[in-house]
Amino acid sequence: MDFTLKIWRQKNAEAKGSFQTYPLREVSPEMSLLEMLDYLNTQLIESGKEPVAFEQDCREGICGSCGLYVNGRPHGPARNTTTCELHMREFTDGETIVIEPWRAKAFPLIKDLVVDRSSFELIMLAGGFISINTGGAAEANSLPVSKINSDRSFAAATCIGCGACVAACKNSSAMLFAAAKIAQYALIPQGRTEARERVENMVRQMDDEGFGFCSNTYGCEFDCPKGISIDFIALMNREFFSAKVCGHKKTSD
Amino acid sequence: MKKPRKSLSSLSQKYIMALAAIFLMLFLIMHLATNLLMLLGDEGEAFDRAVVYLGGNGFIKIVEYLLFAAFLIHISLGVVLQIINTRARPVKYLKAIRTETSLFSRFMFHTGVIIFIFLVLHLVNFFFVRMNWVPLPEHALHSHDFYAMAIVLFQNPWYSGIYLVSFVFLGFHLKHGFQSAFQSLGLNHSKYTPAIKLIGTIYAIAISVGFALIPIYFLFFYS
């Protein structure tokens, strides 16, 4: 297969970027999009040019490192697929493929297609954990969890934190990410102890990072590679309301 | 350690937006129900009685202030949210977005602006007259005689046209807004959400068509 690639090139955060066009011939339809970029980079290096920088790690769709905005959609045209698992056979021969980095104020660009997603880490640090500081794992049967909640918590926990929801959202909102991370704890008893603090702190951190707000267009759900449901955003909203209305006033430590 | 809040959190603002929206949606039902009395063919007698009654009712007066507050909150917060959301993506994508979303959901701000312009016009036509800020049109018996004003206004095809177009956009706004308000309040449930979406669609169509009947009646069927 032959393609014309239009890729965003930017030397560093301060430099002015632009789109560069690269014709690429004899691409195997079995290649993943990242392998196709490896193939391009080999040719660029051989001709003494700077290779295209992009993030990747596991290449099996679970690490959340890769994330490219391909032809107007995060992770490209296939649904429930990460960029690394997107095969070139999803495209038509001779097509022009436009590859852009995630665009959001909260994801500042580092180089070419690499963006800084530390804002997600900071949201996690604000409450995306359960504080169990001591002791071994408790006997599992002493903490009953209903099947439905266990399943839903796990469905939320499949979020790999890639940022596709932010990239897909017209408002660059991180609500689907935050909601998934809040829901995965809110639905199981271990997470209930800190549930109210967690939702307040994580939402506050999300706001401070400069993400947009939710307009309920549900674009995030459509383009999430893990198919995270917007039901979790509603759950986050409920959790937040309950924390604000039923939570106690904060006492100084 | 924690920084003090500069403003209301994103979710609180969404809650306020949704609550104001629900109040406004209830008002639209009330407003439409009253307006449909104009179609009874009794030269506006029933409608006039309803308007005079509502205008003199103390409870309605209080609700009217709440209504202005709801409009003010919903509109100003809508503008604030639009600014925040636009700023959240300083560099736009080159390729047109292909993520599938419902058409109406993407243009809530735009349809909102059109409805706002309509609202200003609508207030100038009717509310300002009642407040004696604008002189009474001919044939009107008293400042509550909206029936006479409606005859004068809607027999002008341009005028009716503006109203009809505005109702189409109002319908678009409500189509997304109805279910969106429930989602923002966290009222999403595997059993009830499909019903909420269906009711939202029926509501949006009923409100637009219902209000549209009035200019259509005066333009084509009233003589």
Image: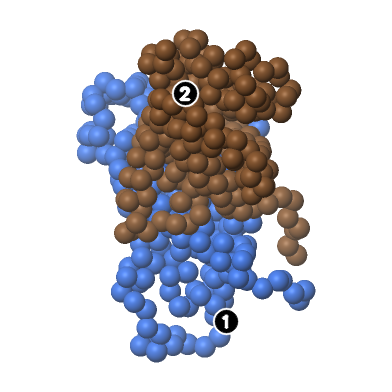
Judge from the rendering whether residue B159 lies leftward or rightward of residue A28; answer left or right.
right
Residue B150, percent across and down?
A: 53, 20
Residues tagged 2 and 1 counted as in contact (Cβ below 8 A): no
Can you tell which of label 2 and label 1 is closer to the viewer? 2
Numbered badge on residue B43: 2
Residue B171, percent across and down?
A: 43, 32
Q: Residue at x 66, y 25 (%)?
A: B143
Numbered badge on residue A72: none
Q: Residue at x 65, y 24 (%)?
A: B142
Residue A74, percent across and down?
A: 41, 39
Residue A223, quarter of the rendered image: top left
Can the viewer see residue B65?
yes
Disc 1 chain ID? A
Q: Which residue is mark 1?
A: A133
- Residue closest to the eye, A10 or B140: B140
Residue B11, percent across and down?
A: 58, 53
- Residue closest to the eye, B45 or A163: B45
Secondary structure category for the residue under label 2: loop
* Amino acid at dot 2: Glu
| Visual hue assigned to chain B | brown
| Visual hue assigned to chain A | blue
- Residue closest to the eye, A200 or B71: B71
Residue B89, quarter of the rendered image: top right
* Amino acid at dot 1: Asn
Crowd band around label 2 with a 10 angstrom C-alpha radius: few (<14), some (14–19), many (20+): few
Q: Mark 2 to mark 1: distance in Å?
A: 78 Å
Crowd band around label 1 with a 10 angstrom C-alpha radius: few (<14), some (14–19), many (20+): few
Q: Residue at x 76, y 58 (%)?
A: B4
For the rendered model, the colour scheme is by chain
